[in-house]
Amino acid sequence: MAERTKKKAASKKAESEKAAPKKAVKKTVAKKASKTTAPAKKTAKKAANKSAKKTEQNVSGYGSGGVDVVMSVDQVAKEAASIAAAAPTIKELENLLPGDVYLSINDLCAGYGKMEILHDFSLRIGQGQSLCLIGPNGAGKSTVLHSIFGFTNIFSGSIMVNGKDVTSLTPSQKLSEAGIAYILQDKSVFPQMTVEENLLMGGFLKDKPAEAKAAAEMVFDKYSRLADRRNKPAGVLSGGERRLLEISRALVMQPQVLLVDEPSIGLEPRFIDMVFEILEDLQRKDGKTIIMVEQNAKKGLAFADIGYVLVSGETAIADAGDRLLENPDVGRLFLGG
């Protein structure tokens, strides 16, 4: 019996020794695999870092295009400010007009509260011309429109329209006496009111309701798209139709100057084209003078006769719209490379 027990113990020991090398082999394989994987991980990480670095180095351009053509707003403002050292003279601004000056801004200092945004800003545009203001955020583009219409504090300087000083007129007086209309950014229609009621709101300064009604009918004659929906709530209109209604409402007072703030904002491409076609029709056929601020700098400059590049409340560059499109500095900083 003792001999049998001894044999059993010896057999167990032999099995245990047999299994031990197998475990050791497994550990060695695992170690080898770990050593092989580590360099591969390191190489992948290195490649990723290199790619990220390369992307950072390629950063240039402004406002459109892929990551490789994007520049920070601060960088744009800094570079644009260096260009502004050779700001255009009044004579150079007037040379962009085919004839006489119709609307002029002269050495204007204006802003909000006590804060001055525009510094000795000047502008010249002829009757029936279009002018587009572009530039980095905070450059004062919308402040120019606000100042013309009477929404800012004017500290010094003047605004003249057709020989008349309109600097101190209220917005209502600018509209009724000087023929200046302001077309707000998106979402200024009254959605619960009908298209016709929205149009009639544009004639609130008319002496008689019948005059506003007659002006609205002229708009309906011009734009059948609105006439077909005259009794529908404005809230059911498409984005492009709402923008058409906003423009048309301003036309009820039959203004000569249209201040257009971001006409393409929030619109699909097909509606953007439609809105610019409407503005072109108003300029070319009806002789309206148009000053606009447009975030889509390429579209705005392609439309406008004149373009101004604003930086820190001053004009850095002024030229014909098509020439600004070809200007390498403007392209690099504002048109996406």
Image (cartoon, grey):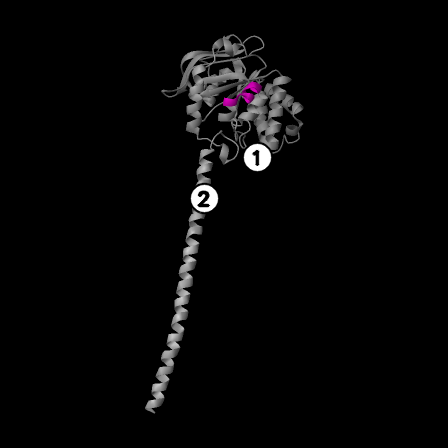
In the picture, measured across the screen, residue 273 lies left or right of residue 117, that is: right
Magenta stretch, main secondary structure, is: helix
Q: Position of residue 2 (x, y in %)?
A: 32, 90
Which x, y percent locates residue 186?
Answer: 53, 30
Q: Which residue, as the protein is rendered here, is positioned at the far left? A: 2
Q: Dot 2, how many residues are within 10 Å of its Cα: few (below 14), some (14-19), or many (20+)?
A: few
* Residue 235: mark: 1
Closer to the camera, 48 or 147? 48
Residue 134, magenta (yes or no): no
Callout 2 secondary element: helix
Q: Residues within 10 Å of mark 1 (few under 14, many from 20)?
A: some
Q: Callout 2, which amino acid?
A: Ala
Query: Which type of secondary structure does the marked residue at label 1 adopt?
Result: helix
**Which span is picked out in magenta?**
321-329
Please tell me whether mark 1 or mark 2 is closer to you in this view.
2
Horizontal and vertical percent position of residue 236: 59, 36
- Name the residue at 43% across, 16% down: 85
Question: In the rendered view, would you say 70 is above or below 4?
Answer: above
- Marking on residue 79: none
Residue linked to disc 2: 48
